[in-house]
Amino acid sequence: MKKYDAIVIGAGHNGLTNAAYLAKAGLDVLVLEKNPYIGGATVSRELHEGWMYSNCSYVCSLLRPEISRDLNLPKFGLQVIPYVGGVTFKRDGDYFGNYDDHERQYREIARHSKRDANAYERYTADVTKQTRFIRPFLLRTPPDPTSFKPRDIQELLYLAKSFYNLGEKVLGDTLRFWTMSIGDFLDEYFETDVIKCHLAGSGIIGTALGVYSPGTAYVLLHHYMGEVDGSVGAWGFARGGMGSVAKALAGAFQSFGGEIRADAEVDRILATGGRTSGVVLANGDEIYADIVVSNLDPKRTFLDIMAEEDLPASVVKQARNFKIRGSSGKLNIALDGLPTFHGLPAKSPLMTGDMHFIDSLERMERAYDDWKNGTWSQDPYVDMLIPTQVDPTMAPTGKHMMSVFVQYAPPKLATGEWTDKDRDAFGKTVIDQIGTYSPNFKDLILHAEVRTPQDIEDEVGLTEGNIFQGELTFDQLLFNRPFPGYAQYRGPIKGMYMCSSGTHPGGGVMSAPGANAAREILMDLNHPSTVPEAYPDD
Amino acid sequence: MTDSEIPPLLLQTPFHSRVADACEINLWEDWKGYTTPAAYSNVELEYFAMRNSASIFDITPMTKYRITGTDGHAYLDRLVTRNLKKLDVGRVMYTAWCNDEGKVIDDGTIFHINDDTFILCSQERHLDWLEWSALGFDVKIEDVTEQIAALSFQGPTSCAILKKMDLEGVENLKPFDLHHYPFQQTELMVSRTGFTADLGYELWISPEHAENLWDALMKAGEDYNIKPVGSEALQIARVEAGFIQAGVEFVPAEQEVRVERSRSPYELGLGWLVHLKKSNFNGQQALKEEKLNGSRFRFTRLDVQGNKPAENSFIFNQQKKVVGMVTSAAWVPTAKRNIAFASLEMPWGKPGDELWAEIYYLRELKWARVLEKCTVLEEPIFDPERRHATPALDY
């Protein structure tokens, strides 16, 4: 039977990125995917005829430009189109809009508070200091602080130098920033609730924490450190939906001779004598390779497809304790036309961006209280976009597709597992909230896909439906991701590696974990790296 | 003279009322004496309208000559470097034309409208040269720049919008085809041409119908994310497309003051436009000699490492000697490359040559300098299927 050089488990964007860089180095690589389609949570699906949904991840910014360029993803069909705008609707009929040009933005904030409009400049400068600090680390392997290997010492020195370069004041700010809550952080800049609220969303998306929970300020940074064509913090739509990212990565991988097998669920990673020799599929087939890379989250990797007896007890313990809590659901809606919203002029440029319906931090915190109580938020925070205003390919002309990310939704309800009835009620809660602000919205609905955290886990394989494959809190970042001692993409047995968002630098459609893991694997094989270096962020 | 007035510094195109309404940021520039927008609202979004949906760019200031007369075809064939005899009625050809020294006067497009009528469209003005070249030919050359209003209408949804405007069969136009369509009470000439290397058209109409054309496009394009775009966005698309521009990549030969400022077609990567074996044409002898003895410069398209555009950069070889300079540069967002056009001294610029761009960039009032490695490109970096497909694809 044929033996591959490497098997990658899971055809999500990180698995495909990892596989592409291994194949680029000349390795014979097989990617295995449990679903009949590739992409994992980076997927476009036609669930209503004529409408394409980005039914998991829905916007793009974090995808490393070095990787996009190096793998020539445009040649394989990837086009990321930036969007602007964004709006938070208020209960009193007013709204706060996020304009892309500086002076109109100033006037819009000033309409709510002149002081806030000025403070926004300080806020932007301070957040930019943090993104400049973090961005160079995205395509680097975190150092092991307990190691005395020359490379770890060198990387630790690089980290220390980066800290030193921040200057004393900013260094203090950075340490605070990485540990404080987004609510407290924004309180230091703004007095207007709706403005804080519009910005705070980025601190809680995908996170089972509230706006006043420590650690949420960093989550905001995670949403600001990406870029579209050099515009740091900008977000865009992948033309044709997020599946275009996976498709392009797969195209690059296949151009290097790689092989993808769909409908091929891995049951077990083979391990004998402290090293891996391949995998067993759910259908019983065995496939052999000296290198096996898991793109599944740490819980699934170590608790589902590896046997406890093959692993050090400490790894089993750490995998069990790994925080990967489900906090969000998703609605994907086919619309017969473009909805209008109270207070907004028709076709306002604000509508091409992210829309929200919670106007105070207190309401956001209450939404989190519902999650803690084991129910979905009755007054949810949604991150809602209508990409078809920009992308002509995802719905029939004049019709629209709406993506509604919903926070919070627990992985299990206080009443037990999610039922069909619960799912319907969850969907209704969200649709009712949107309907409150949009008079024609409900009449325009042609089809809606409602996804609970349980649905996302079942279909995509993300434990609890956690979009980041593990919480982005400081205890699980950098050299602690997924856990101390295993942050350099090497697993506990020889030949086994991790490349998922559960490793540094974490979730979002970034491809950095996949690329970083490939660099480590190639290093172990004494093969020159095929992974590009990061652009300096100067 | 009576009713004497000081002539206006800048003219307005027949689309001006619509352009001015749409131009939110009042970023105007002077293009061939016309007030034209550098941008309307957001350059990035305008660029993406060209690459993702549909864009309108007012090209009325382009210089247009109508050539009529029984010798029209023969005259133009003698004028330009390319074999024009193959240019049938209903077709357009891109070509260059040279002076007798074989240096490029300009590049542009020639439209074969009907048996005896051609339109020559270019960036620069050339009536003087056109008339000198016409000695002995039975032709009439008129400057019709002001008599024809024109829009460049580019992008993946452009054909769908024209179909919605009931331009029957427009999807069957092949690249470089032209056809006339009834439009309201007049005639609209449509050519499948453009400056973006994408699916796109150029629309030609008499000035009094210009505003109606604009309105009809905007209305039909409402659900197709149609946007008017300015010159800054077009610049990015042009560099991505790999197209040169007169006055940027070369000094038009008739305007050259200092030596070595003009370029031959070979020195601009336009060797494919030179048909040395065809019958006599302007510059033929000089170009034959150049072909034999070699050129002075090589036009190269470079893929520059890093993400900083190599604007105005000098290009160095591995011995750190300056071997040329960048004429145009941009980060191109669809192909995701950092592209520079460079004019290099021979023999530099061959595929595989080790070249470096010296890039200056400003960060918070402080200039910094970086040397980035350049790779000579051999293939186009942007050449989508929809650019060539006939019938035109629906985005």
Image (spheres, rainbow, N blue to C red):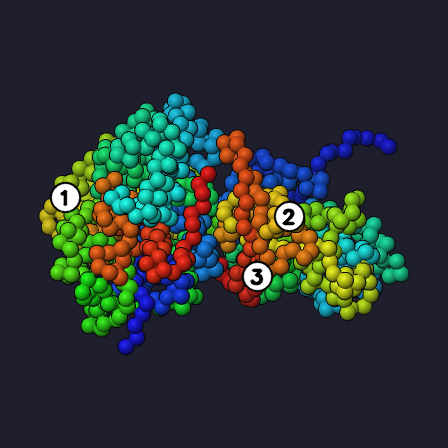
Q: Amino acid at mark 3?
A: Glu
Q: In the figure, residue A253 lies in which quadrant?
A: bottom left
Give neighbour class at mark 2: few <14, some 14-19, many 20+ (Cα, 10 Å). Answer: few
Q: Nearer the viewer, residue B306 or A158?
A: A158
Q: Position of residue A219 (x, y in %)?
A: 30, 40
Chain hosting mark 3: B
Q: Residue B76, how many percent across, how many down?
A: 79, 61
Secondary structure beneath dot 3 equals loop
Q: Nearer the viewer, residue B346 or B205?
A: B346
What amino acid is at disc 1? Gly
On the image, the x and y values in percent for residue A387 come to 40, 49
C-alpha distance separating marks 3 and 2: 27 Å
A185 left or right, relative to B17: left
What kind of residue is marked 2?
Lys
* Residue at 40% from the left image edge and 27% from the top image edge: A122
Q: Position of residue A490 (x, y in %)?
A: 27, 55
User: For mark 3, what is the residue?
Assistant: B379
Q: Residues within 10 Å of mark 3 (few under 14, many from 20)?
A: few
Choose mark 3 or mark 2, whichever is in front: 2
Residue at image position (36%, 68%) is A28
The image quarter containing residue A354 is top left
Mark 1 or mark 2, which is nearer to you? 2
Report the label total.
3
Q: Find disc 2 in the rendering and name its residue.
A: B321
Q: Earlier in the sequence, mark 3 or mark 2?
A: 2
Check the residue under mark 2 and report the chain it is in: B
A342 is higher (above) or lower (below) than B183: above
> What distance separates the C-alpha of mark 1 from that of mark 3?
58 Å
Q: Which residue is mark 1?
A: A374
Q: Secondary structure at mark 1?
A: loop
Q: Nearer the viewer, residue A238 or A21?
A: A21
Q: Residue at x 56, y 52 (%)?
A: B374
